[in-house]
Image (cartoon, rainbow, N blue to C red):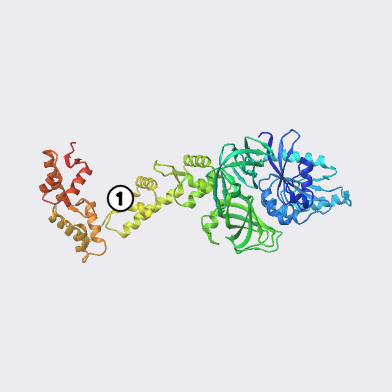
Amino acid sequence: MDQIVTVVVGTAGHIDHGKSSLVRRLTGIDPDRLKEERAREMTIDLGFAPFELPDGRRVGLIDVPGHERFVKNMVAGATGIDLVVLVVAADDGVMPQTREHLEILTLLGLEAGMIALTKIDLPGVDDELVEILELEIEELVEGTFLEGAPILPLDSLSGRGFEAFQEALVKGVEARAATRGDRSQGAYRQPIQRVFTAKGFGTVVTGIPLQGTLQQGDKVEVITAGGTLPGRVRGLQAYGRGVDRVRAGHSAAVNVADVDFKDVARGDTLAAPRVFRAHDMFEVRLEHLPSQARPIKQRQVVRVHLGTAEVLGEVVLLDRETLEPGESSLCQLRLRSKVVGASGDRFVIRRHSPMETLGGGTILGLSRWRLKPFKGFNLERLSNQESALGNLDQAILLALDERGQPARSDRLVETLQHPRQEVESALTALAERGEVLNVSGGKGQPVYLTRAGFKAFCDQVTDSLEAYHESRPLRQGLPRLELRSRLKTSEGVLSLALTTLVEAGEVAERPPGFGRAGFEVQLGEATEALAARLCARYETDGLNPTARGQVLEQEREDVKGDDALDVLLTLCDRGELVALNEEILLHASSYLRAQEAAGALGAQGPFGPSAFKDAIGSSRRVAIPLLERFDATGFTRRQGDTRVLVQD
């Protein structure tokens, strides 16, 4: 693999301007592999050939078609190239596809290239014409990434000027290799340019990896619009030679086991397992080409070129009604079939009919729902995502804030489409800096929330308790399970929030729940009278109490709403009544009398429910819940069908 420079060179330009002839002169290989291409002497699909540097290292060359009917193939080939050779023929000069190819390359984010001025030995082409064409080309590339790039006159047939061109190309490759970042890290992703079957090998897919490294034996996925096909790497080639691994910056051929080639097509993606997924809605920054005469309208149908895929979709403008030429906008792309795309990927859009390039831009993120135009919070969120491009830490924080709920790392891997190890490492670093909190409670997979998100959740807790006090002023606390149900959250994050709020003095524990610190139940004259009446009733009932539901039904005629229930629960909170379960309540004195009876029985040895029932003069309906409460409080311990006293 060290013999391959991780730079891919691509050609671009109008049809019949000499792109394929230039590749043949450089490599000795005819990039027109199809019989139809050779018969028509016209490049239709992508061609590949290795170019050897003076030191023996190889560089990949991709030859793209120049005809306007095959621009979709040109875009597929341009995805992944690092350095472009824009080809202009001396007998034609700058032509429509020269301009369109340059616009597409600019939209795809290319940063380096050179210009080949070909066919300079044709009759009628002299030095004066070459000088005029050079000025025309300089005017064409002004303001683009090719401004200031070398213009090399040459003739591929005679060889004139070819040596100087080749030297400039080698320098360009070396310079690009030195300045381009290392993309061999991260999860492997390769948009598929071509798929075929080879006898004795099975399915083979080719393309330029955008990131990561792949080795023989690795597990992979072929991600299609219809689903994901799991496979395994059986063999690898780079530029016609077998290798043990391939990486970003190579044109790679991958022999994939366990995947039928009939299920795979150009536009699908070969990727590391469980990182990437196909999607049909993307949030983007869209740029409309200044060369266009008409604006892009709201929900206009376009052809979207992303990776090697071409799909129909519509543009939803989020901050304006129309997008004028030369302007940019935050948008949502809604596609008619799913494709793989990640934050930072570049795309191109073309008019549905007639087919011409309208613009392109950058993916900011995946959409989980359809966005409505002119919503300020959406525009702010997308602007933040745009600022976070290339910054994983910031992307994680934004993703957590957008969810508004705690998230496991695997959910963030799915959202951000980054390798699990990278996401988990970033989360650990963010937690150490205090920017995110692990709210899992130490159980299972870590669950994270931003510090701002945790504060917002704590505010929800206090707001819920405040609302509960307002609606139930006779209750001192909201039961924990009911609080968790209201907030629709996990036990881990609720536990951490309650601990934090109790320590801060904002919340107080009020068994069996929690309330706002400082809140006290205030019984008015009427409710105090009700409390006294209920307390007296239960004292009179002794160890044969009326069921709670019946008591409440009898009080309902004289008491409004849930006041009777709240007063009963308040009496339990104050210790004047003891609740054995939802229906059986005892006066505290009756409960103490029952406990003394159990103590007297236990002093003589193990005792059963019947003996206890007879001792207190009650029924099993009351005796069994009493014994269960004694067990729960540690007063007795069950042994088979009997109880024994627990010795201190």
Q: Looking at the image, which residue is at 78% across and 55% down?
A: 95
Residue at coordinates 67% horizontally, 42% vertically from top-left? 251
> Helix or strand or loop: what does disc 1 sit on?
strand
Q: Is residue 554 above or below residue 424?
A: below
Out of 595 and 69, give the one closest to the viewer: 69
Q: Quadrant of the C terminus?
A: top left
Per the image, the residue denoted by label 1 is: 513
User: Residue 320 occupies which quadrant of the picture?
Assistant: bottom right
Q: Is residue 408 left or right of residue 64?
A: left
Q: Nearer the viewer, residue 93 or 452?
A: 93
Question: How far from the left and from the top, in percent, is residue 379?
Answer: 55, 57
Q: Camera-side residue: 5 or 38?
A: 38
At 38% from the left and 53% from the top, the residue drawn is 487
Give residue 201's quadrant in the image.
Answer: top right
Give the percent coordinates (x, y) of residue 265. 62, 50
> How many numbered marks, from 0 up?
1
Question: Is residue 185 at least partly visible in the picture?
Answer: no
Percent of width and height locating residue 579:
21, 51
Q: Amino acid at mark 1?
A: Gly
